[in-house]
Image (cartoon, helix red, strand yellow):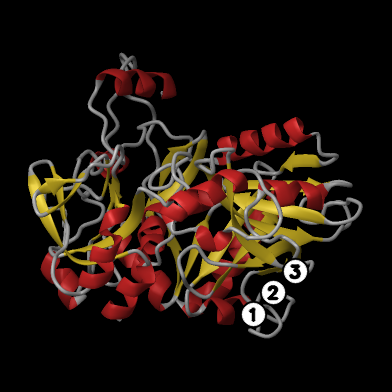
Amino acid sequence: GHETSTFIKVFGSLFDDQNTFSPRCQEKELLSEGCVFEERQGWERPGWYSPKGPAPVPAYDWYGAYGSPRNTDQTYEQLIKGDYTFGFTKNHNLEHDQLRSRKETSVHIGEECLACREQVAIFDMSYFCKLYLCGPEAQKAVDWLFTANTHRPIGRTVYSCLLNSKAGVEGDMTVSAIETGNGGQADPIFKGRGFYIVAGGASAAHTWAHIHTVLSHEDFKVALTDLTDKMGILSIQGPNSRSLLENVVDTDLSEEAFPYSSTKLVRVAGKLCRALRISFVGELGWELHIPWDSCKHVYKAIWEQGKKHGLRNVGFRALYSLSSEVGNHLWNVDLRMDDNPLEAGLEFTCRNHGEYLGKKALDIIKKKGVNKRMVFLQLEDLLTNTTNSGDKAGAILVTRNSSESKLPKVTLKWPTEHNLVISTARGQVAESLKSVIDRQFGAGPPFYINVRNERHSTLQAAINRKCVLITLL
């Protein structure tokens, strides 16, 4: 099935969210909840959940299955074909009036977004990159690798960039200082001070390769261990996350005992896990990093308690929409190795003291100034699945006063933000327009975006995404 599906992709039309007709669907618990899977980097991850219930993949009955009867249940096939569009997919089900009144709000992905903002959601993020770095020179190695200050107490987590020699962003990730354990997947044994590194799944192979190359080149006395396929991640996010987890976790989850950007070893339903107080979606929540053999047990225990707290399974389509609301970057989409932290608004991750890979180049850029800036745009019109515009795009023109941007690369994406009932874009504009953005913020449409011969004006433009959120809320 995979071979034929790959062959068709070579000669057929490819859509942004197109997925295979022949997934493996190994996660039976998620499949029974109506999960429609996506394939990324050889992993299956939850794309979204059908409210109609399970849609199991039927037996192979297409190209090459001669003499076999046609499957009568076409539910899965119809769900997949709903993504065959360059615009919003049918699975978003975005209706302008429904969104405005919040009655029967987009019954698929939109409801998942609202569940996270209003109650509590569980994300299966197991395909994320998970690395341990330890050894006699572990601190020296992370000082050179990462832009953030990692000289934090044991149990603290920092968000950092990983740069190349030209100050381009090779990845963004969290780095946690940890102490030695008893030899399990969640608590490895090592001498001295160790570090737990977590990065996005789509860039996992790239992240590991870049770190490994740098460590080898500098000949640090460290060990880099990849636990990506040996640990799962369940992220519990939303206003009700603390009240839910307090019933299954043996640790005090209060603000004082478990502050943001910290990590602890905890037991969840009796199973040892590493909990990180962190959020990719801007909500109260924890990530549970679980040894593979314990994942199903922990998942079932959380669901048993979650019923009375409004728990809902949520996929990556909603995750990216939610993260866009709070201005988080998605490496390899709107943040790449030819962007530097200053252009991307990530200078807060870069420490001024000490040396790290790319710092010399970054200091030169600071003196000369940047040529472009990442900006966040709020569109005047709500993009729906009735428009010709898509929910994700790249290489789209950003214009001002009918003159095109002179940038060599322009990227743009606008997952509709279901909670705020707006459509947003993220793009790059010339640095000379920064003062225009600051001056005209909230005072008319300073930019336009052009997609497939459609022109969309903007209501807001901001270097800092939080400015847009404040004006809306």
Q: Are marks 3 and 2 in contact (CB under 8 Å)?
A: yes
Q: Secondary structure at mark 1?
A: loop
Disc marking residue 246: 1
Rendering coords of residue 309 (x, y %): 49, 79
**Image quarter for residue 381?**
bottom left
Quadrant in which the C terminus appears: bottom left
For label 2, the residue is: 249
Task: Tell me which residue sits at (31%, 19%) in the image.
Answer: 10
CA separation in Å, label 3 and label 1: 12 Å
In the image, is residue 21 above or below residue 53? above
SS class, disc 2: loop
Pointer 3 or 2: first along the chain? 2
Residue marked by disc 3: 266
Q: For the residue marked with disc 3, what is the amino acid?
A: Val
* Mark 2 nearby-residue class (10 Å; few <14, some 14–19, many ≥20): many
Instruction: Work out how far the residue at label 3 is from the one at label 2, CA to CA, in angstroms.
Output: 7 Å
Q: Residue at x 57, y 75 (%)?
A: 305
186 on left or right of 390: right
Which residue shows up at 64% across the image and 63% down it? Answer: 158
Type of the residue with mark 2: Val
Residue at 72%, 54% in the rendered image: 196
Mark 3 falls on what kind of element? strand
**Please, which residue is most extreme toward the right here?**
191
Q: Are marks 1 and 2 in contact (CB under 8 Å)?
A: yes
